[in-house]
Image (cartoon, rainbow, N blue to C red):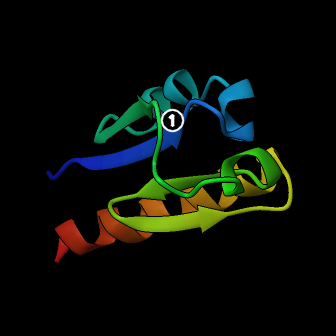
């Protein structure tokens, strides 16, 4: 099974959620990495987002972003099942 990396900026609105425990407990293939900066200046303070295996995932709220992250994780996992 492959690994899926979810990156979150320290200044991002997603930092208020314990994304690491939430995702890593549900998906053992996932590693959540907190980064000091993901080079999307200004975006991190305005809109919740994360990067899943290089793909930016956005949401209007943290909850919506989490659902979209989980959906992307499912898509990534499906690639390894082929």
Read off the residue under disc 1.
Answer: 23
**Residue 57 vertical position relative to residue 24 in the rendered view, above or below:** below
- Residue at the spot 35% in from the left edge and 64% down from the top edge: 54
Q: Position of residue 74 (x, y in %)?
A: 44, 63
Q: Position of residue 7 (x, y in %)?
A: 43, 44
Callout 1 crowding tier (Cα within 10 Å): few <14, some 14–19, many ≥20: some
| Nearer the observer, 81 or 5 | 5
- Residue at the spot 32% in from the left edge and 47% down from the top edge: 5
| Nearer the observer, 67 or 57 | 57
- Residue at the spot 73% in from the left edge and 51% down from the top edge: 48
**Residue 9 vertical position relative to residue 15 in the rendered view, above or below:** below
- Residue at the spot 45% in from the left edge and 48% down from the top edge: 38
The image quarter in which residue 62 lies = top right
| Nearer the observer, 17 or 76 | 17
Secondary structure at badge 1 equals helix
Going by the picture, which residue comes out furthest to the bottom? 82
**Residue 16 vertical position relative to residue 8 in the rendered view, above or below:** above
């Amino acid at each position: 099974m492959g690994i899926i990396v979810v990156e979150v900026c320290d200044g991002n609105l997603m930092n208020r959620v314990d994304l690491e425990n939430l995702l890593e407990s549900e998906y053992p293939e996932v590693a959540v990495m907190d980064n000091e900066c993901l080079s999307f200046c200004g975006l991190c303070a305005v809109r919740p987002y994360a990067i899943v295996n290089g793909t930016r995932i956005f949401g209007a709220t943290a909850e919506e972003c989490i659902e979209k992250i989980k959906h992307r994780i499912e898509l990534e996992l499906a690639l390894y099942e082929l």
